[in-house]
Amino acid sequence: RNAEIIGQIFGLEDEVEELWTAIDEDVTAVQELTAEAGTALIVMTSGGEVNAYGLGSRFGWIHDTLGFTPVVEDVEAATHGEAISFEFILETNPDWLLVLDRDAAVGEQAEAAAQILDNELVAQTTAWSNAQVIYVDPVDWYLIEGGLTKLDRMVEAIGTSLTAEE
């Protein structure tokens, strides 16, 4: 809605419509991929801890719009996710793990998400075993609140990750 208003103010309605069309096409392409991809779990690492996000959360559009099947449906939709353990990740055993490194987003000097998750429990999951771990861009996913260009980058990145093995 904001993009449409700004487009009207600056006489850029056609450009906004083109961006929406491109995003819709990318979403449709990703939905075709997620329909066969299996389950997904969205996690954020911060200060060595791991939080999960699910339906209705700030990242719930991964399930609602892009079509990833949630590995678990009752994750609390809190602002910073629900605190989880490595045992939880193993028990739920997602086919795909989408990872946001909050410390990288805010410039904290801390252990990287890849290091935090690189342990014997997570290594036993389908996602880790099949190299189906997507490290999302921390700036796009955590710091920037909106925008068509950002949304397009996020959708394209997921699509690229899902087709990387093909």
Image: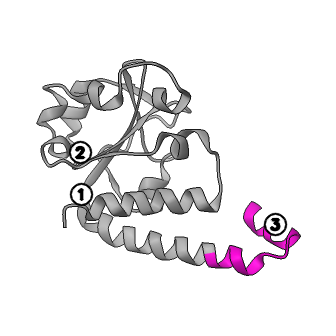
Mark 3 touches mark 2? (CB < 8 Å): no
Q: Is residue 39 above or below residue 114?
A: below
Q: Quadrant of residue 52?
A: top left
62 versus 84 height, above or below:
below
> Mark 3 to mark 1: distance in Å?
38 Å
Alpha carbon distance from label 3 to label 2: 40 Å
- Furthest residue toward bottom: 14
**In the image, residue 119 above or below residue 144:** above
Tell me: residue 51, above or below residue 66.
Answer: above
Name the quadrant of the C terminus: bottom left
Q: Secondary structure at mark 2?
A: loop
Q: Check disc 1 and report the residue beneath it.
A: 38
Q: Which residues are magenta?
A: 1-18
Residue 165 quadrant? bottom left
Mark 3 or mark 1, earlier in chain: 3
Q: Is residue 8 magenta?
A: yes
The residue beneath circle 2 is 94
